[in-house]
Image: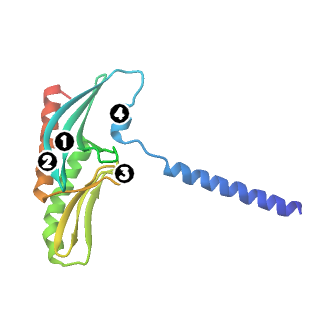
Amino acid sequence: MKKILLIFLALTVSCLAIQAQQDKNLEKQLTKFEEFSSKTGVIVKFVDVTLPNLPVSYSTLQTGIRTIMRGSENAYFYRLEEPETSRSVSHIAMIEYSDLVEINKAVSRLVADVDADVAANPDYLENKFKTSDGFEVGYYVSKQQAHWYLKLERYSSSTVFLKSQQDVVDAFEAAQRKIEELRASNGK
């Protein structure tokens, strides 16, 4: 009987350890914006520059550049904000400059692929790029049409559909140019 109890106890402890590890893996990871802006013990200054809104189906995304000044360090983020919905929920993507550069490279590749993907006439096809912070840009093809989308946040249903492919290209390239201009004027 003692052996059965010991085996049961060992199995229970093993199951609890596995569950604890799974819970730890599901914890929310901090984004680059959260990591940089949440430092304690230092003064952190936020400076916003507004950019033109990005048209999406049924509304627009407010966009801008947020500069975070923390001591002698500056960080630059492209901010995309979906206005509050009827449930008082808004979704915000904060894309760090180096991620924005990679997104622009990926968007160029996606734009190069989209016509061939539509011509292949699939039942469904999805082509996307995802950052480590969970932001996604891409398109899906259905019924011989490409539909571009952005997923603003990793942990929520924050997908917005864009009116045109060119809107994506123009908005993200303009954001990168603006950050480069700000970096040059701030010397960092």
Dot 3 alpha-carbon crowd within 10 angstroms: few under 14, some 14 to 19, many 20 or more? some
**Reading the chain from its start, which is encountered first: label 1 or label 2?**
1
Determine the CA span between mark 4 and mark 3. 18 Å
Dot 4 alpha-carbon crowd within 10 angstroms: few under 14, some 14 to 19, many 20 or more? some
Give left or right: position of 13 versus 3.
Answer: left
- In the rendered structure, which amino acid carries the disc numbered 4? Phe
Give left or right: position of 25 versus 116.
Answer: right
Task: State the residue position of label 4.
Answer: 36
Task: State the residue position of label 2.
Answer: 171
The quadrant holding residue 124 is bottom left
Residue sitting at 35 percent across and 31 percent down?
A: 37
Determine the CA span between mark 2 and mark 3. 21 Å
Residue sitting at 12 percent across and 59 percent down?
A: 164
Q: Nearer the viewer, mark 1 or mark 4?
A: 1
**Reading the chain from its start, which is encountered first: label 4 or label 3?**
4
Q: Secondary structure at mark 3?
A: loop
Task: State the residue position of label 3.
Answer: 154
Q: Quadrant of the N terminus?
A: bottom right
